[in-house]
Image: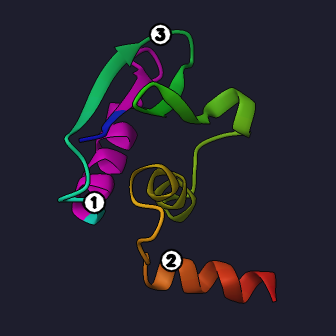
Amino acid sequence: MPRVAIEYCTQCRWLLRASWMAQELLSTFATDLGEVALIPGTGGVFRITVDGEQVWERKADGGFPDIAVLKQRVRDRVAPDRDLGHVDRRESENSD
């Protein structure tokens, strides 16, 4: 089962944001994930990986992920055929 790791900056007090994202991922991918880990870090880090592969990094991606975008990126790695319902429909409506 895939492992998601959310590394967050303790100096910046981003634990609440990281734990909320972990909760959202666990709620959405309840049977598709083996683990969601919160990893304390420093220096402004906010990085999310799936099985060691980076799916979001605050500095490289320009801030924090919209939860819909994060769910899509995680889905693309753990359950590519899965429909995310309104998250996917909203994205396709915006691209029309």
Which label's residue is closer to the chain start, 1 or 2? Answer: 1
Which label's residue is closer to the chain start, 3 or 2? Answer: 3
- Mark 2 crowdedness (10 Å alpha carbons): few <14, some 14-19, many ≥20: some
- Determine whether, in the image, residue 82 is placed left or right of residue 58: left
Q: Which residue ends up furthest to the top in the rendered image?
A: 42
What's the magenta region? 5-27
Q: Label 2 near label 1: C-beta < 8 Å? A: no
The residue type indicated by label 1 comes to Phe
Q: Check the picture and name the quadrant holding the C terminus.
A: bottom right
Q: Residue 36: which quarter of the image?
A: top left
Q: Is residue 92 above or below residue 44?
A: below
- Rendered image: mark on residue 29: 1
- Determine whether, in the image, residue 54 is placed left or right of residue 7: right
- The residue singled out by tag 2 in the image is 87
**x and y percent of residue 66 in the render?**
56, 57
Does 8 lie within the magenta span? Answer: yes
Q: Is residue 12 above or below residue 25?
A: above
- The residue singled out by tag 3 in the image is 42
Q: Residue at image x 33%, y 31%?
A: 15
Q: CA distance from mark 3 to mark 2?
A: 31 Å
**x and y percent of residue 74 in the render?**
46, 51
Which label's residue is closer to the chain start, 1 or 3? Answer: 1
Q: CA distance from mark 1 to mark 2?
A: 14 Å
